[in-house]
Image (cartoon, rainbow, N blue to C red):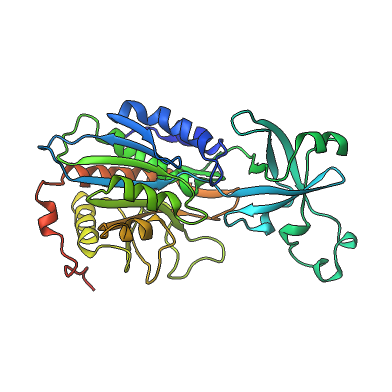
Amino acid sequence: MTDILPFLKELLSAPGLSGYEDPAAQIIEKQWRPLVHEISRSKIGSLHGLRRGAGKAPRPSVMIATHMDAIGLMVTGLVDGFLRVTSVGGVDARVLPGQLVTVHVGQIGNLSHLPAVVAQPPARLLPPEQADGPVPLEYLLVDTGLPPKKVAELVRVGDLVSYASEPVELAGEAIAGHTLDNRASVAALTVCLEELQGRPHAWDVWAVATVQEEIGLTGGYTSAYELHPTIALVVDVTFAKGPGANDWQTVPLGKGPTLCMGPNIHPALFNSLKELADKLEIPYTLEYAPRHTGTDTFATQVVAEGIPSALFGIPLRYMHTPVEVAALKDIQRAGRLMAEFIAGLTPDFMEKITWDKQPPC
């Protein structure tokens, strides 16, 4: 089985906030280029890799969507040489004090990178109602160590701030780092592409790293509209069991990916994936999403006349923190299951897809 760890660690070390994904896209493009026949960018920056099928043209196509954007911060003001910031995506201010960050200054394409830390003012300098408990983001400061005059010369409102901590290999074949949401899923898609090397598949495969999922599923909508695949598989992270997170809304870490059930998911696709996983003895957990999944699955499902879609989940602890934790074997298993599904797609598969083929209760 392919060792995906070096690629994943490189990807986790890159910035790439929503709307500014290019640093991550360059790493992914380099990794995917030998694995696909064509590679391109959408008009808003999503990465599209096409692996052609062996069937007779025109061929049906499957799109595998994984978002590559990261959450982070944006500068909103300068105060005595310190930076005020706001969030880009769903940042939890409780985990920010003491974090190492990087301030990206300068024009896009000609950036400089300032190391910095997130500082929390002492309680006596905060409003009385904020003196106890977690400090809201609006009161936190980013400290570059530079004098105020130099900060004013270098930093402008709108500059980005990303997490700077490097990924760490944990015991039990797990990895911790920022932006495992959702670059763990990009790694799973890469495993899928590598598994397909040398294996015939009748359908075209679109490998897609979407942009701006964290702030509105933007790349999911636009790539699905542009590519108009026959079906879509979406891979994103989901909540793994951990401290204080053990109810039905969480899943085990290291026990395989999840297969999601719910109104965003086409029931016949779900059945096909579940039956295949059972046949191949690939471990998985059933996940239930009774409403909007909060992933690109919603976007792919509703584009144009509607695209039959399914959702894989990579279990993840401590989501939207700088120390997200995922199990490498969950990533590998998700990639293998997708590859086996694609290799088994027949030209007449869509004739068997009907919405009334409901999953077993």
Figure check: 359 above or below 76: below
Nearer to the camera, 244 or 48: 48
Quadrant in which the C terminus is drawn: bottom left
Give the farthest residue toward the bottom: 361
Numbered label tally: 0
Report x, y in % for residue 43: 42, 40
Quarter the N terminus occupies:
top left
Q: Is residue 147 visible?
A: no
Q: Which residue is located at x 72 percent, y 58 percent? A: 137
Q: Position of residue 267 (x, y in %)?
A: 23, 64
Quarter where residue 163 is shown = top right
Q: Does residue 7 lie above or below 317 as drawn? A: above
Residue 16 is drawn in which quadrant?
top right
Comparing 109 with 284, the one in front is 109
- In this view of the protein, which residue sits in the foreground, 18 or 316? 18
Q: Is residue 261 rendered to the left or right of residue 158?
A: left
Looking at the image, which residue is at 30% across and 30% down? Answer: 38
Q: Is residue 228 left or right of residue 54?
A: right
Q: Is residue 248 visible?
A: yes
Point 75% across, 38% down: residue: 155
Q: Is residue 118 above or below residue 144?
A: below
Q: Is residue 215 left or right of residue 298?
A: right
Going by the image, does 359 lie left or right of 245?
left
Q: Which x, y percent locates residue 247? A: 47, 70
Q: Residue 300, image x and y in percent?
A: 33, 55
